[in-house]
Amino acid sequence: MTEMKISHAPSHAPLWPSIAALVLATGYLIALLAVEEQTLIIGLLAAAVVVVVAANYFGGFGAVGRSFAAHEGAFSLSAIIAAFAVAAYFHDNHFVLLLVVTVILYIVATLGLNVQFGYSGIVNFAGASFFGVGAYTSAVLTAHTAVPTLLVVPIGGVCAALIGSLLLLPVLRTRGHYAALVTIAFALLFKTFLEVNDVLGGPQGLQVGGMNILGWSFNDNWSIGSIDLSFYLNYFLLSMLLLIGAFVLVRRLERSWIGLNLDALRLDETAAGCFGLNIARWKIVSFTLGNLLIGMAGALFGMVGSFIAPNNYTFADSLILVSILLLGGIGNVWGVIVATIIVVIVPEKLQTIQEYRFLLYASLVIAVLLFRPDGLLPRPVRRYFPGAQP
């Protein structure tokens, strides 16, 4: 029941340790994304592991953690600036910007999964399916309707939430492993449905139209003076807006009385019911809200990639989303961000292990469960007043 406690972070902790760690992490990320030679990439990854182990051994993370807890707002603003710094550095590099946008949208999707799994304890192994619902919604709407493309993103989220409502009854009537089996069955059925449905392109998939806002085509390169900019910067800006909105929503939800109810539901469903909590209501809220976020991320991701196919939304892809959650720390939104960066970027940079990425994910999950079962960044004790003195 430790999550139910209310703690106060020391306000006298200085800001600079967390900002210094963020600056170092941003510089390292830029170096990793810029390097192409495999030996250098392996060297950078090995150096990161050594630095993290050494910092943990000498207590460096303690100072960073206290600084972060006392100044989370300033750190959040700095993290946004850091993301824009990375995008500015690679302003004309299509591949890197596509990778950055992919990371951002995967973070939004795993934030939705975090609401379900991390807060209310509903295990969802069909995350990629709801991601696909959003993507297919954007494909159909951009090809056959005149709906403004900016509205396609929220509509994709609503469609994912509505289709997810089909699973509400079995999810409400089961719990634990049995609820997980329901979502696994849905993930398998969803891929099969896409493959046999010619209206949705069958196994060949569908083209997806690009975002266009008041004549501003997101799929066209642009320039400022003599500086050429990749068209993926358009999607980066929109993805960041979506991420900021999703992050604020999930963080506010966690700190609200709704978050308290979801925590109580996850920790002991029977006890929560005995104390008068409406179990069905909070399960519906959690499952629907999570699918809404996943679907919105999927709708925008479909436009970014311009093409979708059933093989992009398999049960294995759902396991990747779950592995991100386990690796980062269930319930910790910052852990989700760190884990997504690792899971998405490392296999892309290490071309030699591309074919073995699922083996890498499985190894990571096993290692985390064995040696750090709470994830890289375990969920901290609930706080309501950052910086307040006890």
Image (tube, grey):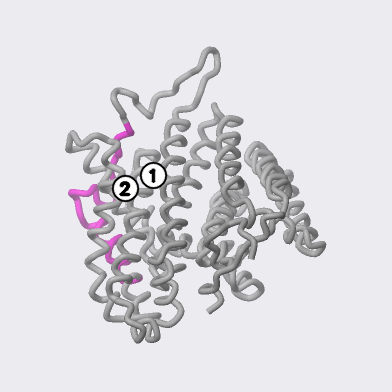
Residue 305 higher or lower than 189, as above or below? above
Residue 346 higher or lower than 147, as above or below? below
**SS under mark 2:** helix
Res. 300 image quadrant: top left
Report the predominant secondary structure element of the magenta stretch.
Answer: helix
Mark 1 closeness class: few <14, some 14–19, many ≥20 residues within 10 Å: many
Res. 375 image quadrant: bottom right
Q: Nearer the viewer, residue 41 or 66?
A: 66
Per the image, the residue denoted by label 1 is: 301
> Quick one: label 2 or label 1, which is nearer the N terminus?
2
Q: Amino acid at mark 2?
A: Ala
Question: Which disc is residue 135 wearing?
Answer: 2
Residue 44 % position (x, y): 73, 47
Q: Magenta residues, as a range?
A: 184-211
Mark 2 closeness class: few <14, some 14–19, many ≥20 residues within 10 Å: many
Residue 38 visible in the picture:
no
Residue, far right? 58
